[in-house]
Each structure stands twice: as structure tokens, then as C-alpha cells.
Image (spheres, rainbow, N blue to C red):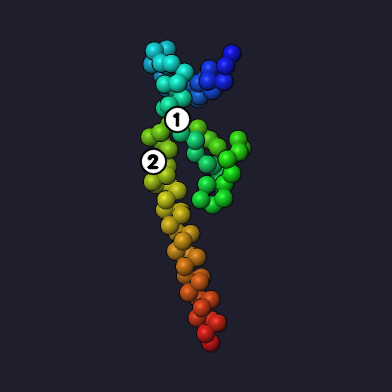
Amino acid sequence: MNDKLRLASALLARGEIPYEQSKKMSNEQIIAHYEWDHYPVRKCDGGPDEAWNLVPRLIEAHRVKTATIDAPAIAKGRRIRRKWAQHRQRMEAK
């Protein structure tokens, strides 16, 4: 048994691709439907490429999560850091 077969089998076990559809797909086609999401620690927050921090997600679901959860949280973190930097500058100027 090769690694692609094992990975495709594990991804199919998630139940996100219908069984009848999966029977018509190659291992490579099954794998191509997925992207690896860094979770719970986002890549931009220093999340490592380690098995405990990677979750397979269907490409569309990954895009939706990135747009609705990750991008707003990243933007909020930047706003907070910018405000803190401005606050520190004001306090040091006094």
C-alpha cells in the first residue's frame, strides 16, 4: 500500500466526498480536493508545519474559513498592535 492510497483513504473517511463520486476518482483526484489548514495556530502567527497543527479541509471550505475567520482575526490583531504602539509612543513622549 502506498502513501497516496493511505492519504486518499483517510481523507475519504472524513465523509466530505460522496461515496459514489469517490469511486470514479483516482487517489490524486481525491487528494487534489483538499488543502492543509494551519489550525489551531495560524501560519502567520508562527504555526508550524507539524501534523498536530494541520487540518485537511476541502478547498472551498478552506477559502471560506480564511475569508470569514482568519483574515478578520489577523486584521484585528494588526489594529490592536498598531494602537498599542501609538499608545506607547504617547506615553514615552510625556
Assess disc 2: are there few (<14), some (14-19) or many (≥20) residues with their C-alpha within 10 Å of its C-alpha. few
Answer above or below: position of 73 versus 79.
above
Element class at badge 1: strand
Is 65 positioned to the left or the right of 89 in the image?
left
Residue lying at 45% horizontally and 48% vertically, measured from the top left: 70
Instruction: Kindly indicate the quadrant of the structure image that contains residue 61.
Output: top left
Assess disc 1: are there few (<14), some (14-19) or many (≥20) residues with their C-alpha within 10 Å of its C-alpha. some
Element class at badge 2: helix
The amino acid beneath tag 2 is Val
Disc number placed over residue 34 in the picture, else none:
1
Residue lying at 45% horizontally and 30% vertically, measured from the top left: 34
The x and y percentages for residue 26 are: 43, 16
Answer above or below: position of 5 versus 80.
above
Answer above or below: position of 46 versus 76.
above
Answer above or below: position of 55 versus 1.
below
Q: Label 2, on which residue?
A: 64
Sequence-earlier tag: 1 or 2: 1
Q: Does the rendering let one see residue 13?
A: no
The x and y percentages for residue 82 are: 47, 68
Residue lying at 38% horizontally and 41% vertically, measured from the top left: 64
Quarter of the image with the N terminus is: top right
The amino acid beneath tag 1 is Tyr
The x and y percentages for residue 94 are: 53, 87
Is 55 positioned to the left or the right of 60 in the image?
right
Choose between 80 and 32: the one closer to the eye.
32
Label 1 vs label 2, nearer the camera: 1
Disc number placed over residue 78 in the picture, else none:
none
Residue placed farthest to the bottom in the image?
Answer: 94
Residue lying at 53% horizontally and 35% vertically, measured from the top left: 55
Q: Does the rendering let one see residue 79?
A: yes
Give the alpha-carbon distance from disc 1 to disc 2, as whole Å: 13 Å
The x and y percentages for residue 57 are: 46, 33
